[in-house]
Image (cartoon, rainbow, N blue to C red):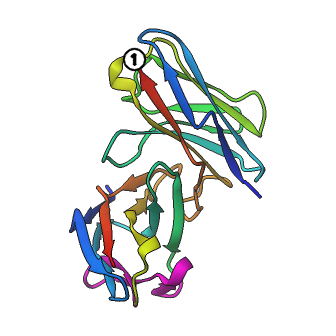
Amino acid sequence: DAMVIQNPRYQVTQFGKPVTLSCSQTLNHNVMYWYQQKSSQAPKLLFHYYDKDFNNEADTPDNFQSRRPNTSFCFLDIRSPGLGDAAMYLCATSRVGLRTDTQYFGPGTRLTVL
Amino acid sequence: AQSVTQLDSHVSVSEGTPVLLRCNYSSSYSPSLFWYVQHPNKGLQLLLKYTSAATLVKGINGFEAEFKKSETSFHLTKPSAHMSDAAEYFCVVSTNTGFQKLVFGTGTRLLVSP
């Protein structure tokens, strides 16, 4: 019954060691989003894909990259994690990206950087 | 530009009493407004949304919200709080132009005491 799935739920990495977070969806939605949410803050959009078209937010650090090999899967790559990258990472999907669309969120991956 | 203001960072209620979480919005066009709930270490779940249909919107788990254009408000209410309602609540507005982006409020933490 799960619609947006994120793996792993908890990820521990070392300072500077690359890490990849995974998101998959069973909704067949065109749009997939990645958000970063730090403690006691609102989610912050990093980027989104409309099908294969990648759209980066202007203030997303170069350290963050993403891949979407097919409709169902999307990955977040952090090339050299710093202590400031410790956060909850949320994946979301929406049908076509209209302003009335609902975004469906996954359970999140909590990243710890040692 | 669109924005939302959540007027209370914390709201405390007793179980069985009414809940009121306040949200004011700013938008140059008819807005699309959402309320999401986030339980600790979980993703965001949609409670309800307003997209220019009925001004009184009913959501899941007994929550509802009323869109009031004259007051630029979209307050979330529930007649009787349950312990399981304790969570963080985000009021969200969708951007009106181009691709959908969600603009989050700063969140309201609801505390429910026995």
| Mark 1, residue position | A114
Is residue B27 or residue A20 the one in the foreground? A20
| Coordinates of residue A35 in the picture (x, y in percent) | 48, 40
Q: Name the side, left or right, on which B103 lies relative to B58.
A: left
Magenta segment boundaries in residue numbering: B53-79
| Coordinates of residue A58 in the picture (x, y in percent) | 39, 30
| Coordinates of residue A29 in the picture (x, y in percent) | 72, 50
Is residue B40 visible in the rendered image? The answer is yes
Residue A76, placed above or below residue B20: above
Is residue B26 visible in the rendered image? The answer is no
Q: Residue at x 77, y 58 (%)?
A: A1
| Coordinates of residue B80 in the picture (x, y in percent) | 40, 88
Q: Name the side, left or right, on which A97 lies relative to B102.
A: right
Q: Residue furthest front?
A: B114
Residue A60, placed above or below residue A40: above
Return the chain for callout 1. A
Secondary structure of the residue carrying tag 1 is loop
Q: Is residue A83 magenta?
A: no
Q: Residue at x 27, y 85 (%)?
A: B70
Q: Residue furthest top?
A: A16
Q: Residue at x 33, y 74 (%)?
A: B112
The amino acid sitting under disc 1 is Leu
